[in-house]
Amino acid sequence: MANNFHQKITGDQNFQQLDLFADTTSPEELIQEKNLQDQDMVESEAILIGAPFSAAKSEEKFPRELAILYVEAKDDSYRVHAHHADHEELETNFQSAPVLSYSQHMIDIENCHLPDMIGKMRKFSEEDCKAHQIRSWLIRLRKTLQEKFKQNLSCLIINDGTNFEIPWEMMYLEDEHLGASIPTVRWANIPDPDNVYDKAKRLITISCNRQECCGDIIAYAPTIEELTHVKEEVDVINKFKSKLFKTIPEFSSYLHQVKHDVSLIFIASHGYLGNNICDISFGETITSLMELHYWNFTFLKNCNTVVFMNVCHSGRLLKDDQFKTSEFYMGFPTFFLKRGARGVIGTMERVRDDYAAQITQNFFQEYRSNPELSVPEILRNLRFQAAKKLQSNVNALENWEFFFYTFMYVYYGNPMTVLRLTPSGGKSHG
């Protein structure tokens, strides 16, 4: 019988319970065979996470292939706690948060200068005290894994409980950007809607089992005059077995009756973000996040599905101040993960239509070229390609734009999710 690992963390009001890892099988099933190097199962023992995070207790070790970065806010300050099963922990003090978010930079979209933001993130990585500590910790961790275990760091899970929206994927390490070097996964504290009895287990868990997403693609891509490049995304989707809808009523009605496996829900449309969670919306009819609560997504509990929202602001989370449950941040990623999705791809700001279409094409091309890659690995490769393109010619504005928009895409969910899309007219995986 395979060994299991289970990570539970309990903390204070800010980190009440970070129950990140559900029961899973051995690490041999966590990492794709191409990356396996005779890994040993990590021993199960208690680990003390640290005093600043309120005597949090870890009941068992994380798998060695993963590291976790917790980010906590207090007023306008933040602190970081980094954890790995076989490496010293990192714990920083509170420090004023940097103004580096995509949204802050794009307030004046007509006059924003993309090289400025990318340069600021590089400067932050090199000179900021906290950033320097994180960089140093990650660099030493990767070196330790190589020298001691002959392994690579397969994933960094980032649980950012702040509204500062620091673009962690853009952080610079030694000679590369974090998100272009290490597969990154975003996570959040998400209340479990199915657990109304056990307060100690009120948050959903992040599973690290390898999960293959088989079945059809269900896509919503409306015909909107100003979104001229959506047709290019539709052409890509049509290369796979899919059901495509151009209106919200048709899309929602079909979801209500789904009985088959769904590998991917793909949405390409406008997206909107206001000051609270009631102002998060998408589509030609401006369908709100609140309205989605009455759509039927029952099938997500019964099949492995990734949601790819190629929609402006779709990866952003807001505090639930509207209903005074200010403990949690909410958005499309948390909504779909609560409903049972294995992963959610979203964007951290507005994305230009032409680049949104290009990134869709690049995503599916990378999948077709390397179908064994997990979704976070595909996004890592796209970022690597964008960074390489920028380095090849920093005088081309389109290279800065391509880099900027590519890094804007983030992934929430299971780090080991693999797509198994069916070619158009082909036989389904099973």
Image (spheres, grey):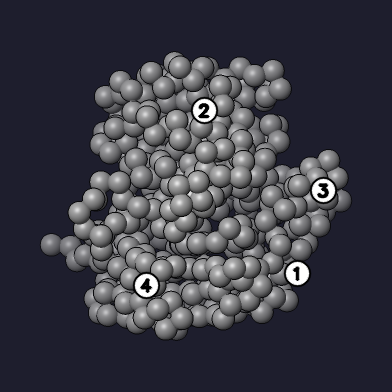
Of labels 2 and 3, the one closer to you: 2
Query: Which of the two labelled residues, at mark 4 and mark 3, occupies the earlier sequence position?
Result: 4
Q: Secondary structure at mark 2?
A: strand
Residue depth check, mark 2 versus mark 1: number of the one nearer the observer: 2
The residue sitting at 44% across, 59% down in the picture is 327
Q: Is residue 169 above or below residue 270?
A: below
Secondary structure type for disc 1: helix
Q: Earlier in the sequence, mark 2 or mark 1?
A: 1
Q: Residue at x 30, y 68 (%)?
A: 8
Residue 258 image point, x, y percent: 31, 23
Three-letter code for the amino acid on which mark 3 is drawn: Cys
Mark 1 or mark 4: whose residue is earlier in sequence: 4
The residue singled out by tag 1 in the image is 123
**Local secondary structure at mark 4:** loop
Q: Count neighbours of disc 3 (C-alpha within 10 A) and say few if under 14, some if 14 to 19, many if 20 or more.
A: few
Q: Earlier in the sequence, mark 4 or mark 2?
A: 4
Mark 1 surroundings within 10 Å by alpha-carbon count, few (fewer than 14), some (14 through 19), many (20 or more): some
Alpha carbons under labels 4 and 2: distance apart: 36 Å
* Marks 2 and 3 in Cβ contact (< 8 Å): no
In contact (CB < 8 Å): disc 4 and disc 2: no
Which residue is drawn at the image coordinates 32% and 54% (left, top)? 204
**Residue bearing the label numbered 2:** 287
Q: What residue does disc 4 label?
A: 11
- Residue positioned 80% across, 45% down in the render: 108
Mark in the foreground, 1 or 4:
4
Whole-Å distance between the Cαs marked 2 and 3?
A: 29 Å
Amino acid type indicated by mark 1: Lys
- Please identify the quarter of the rendering in which residue 285 is found: top right
Question: Which residue matches tag 3?
Answer: 112
Q: Quadrant of residue 298?
A: top left
Front residue (pair 118, 384): 118
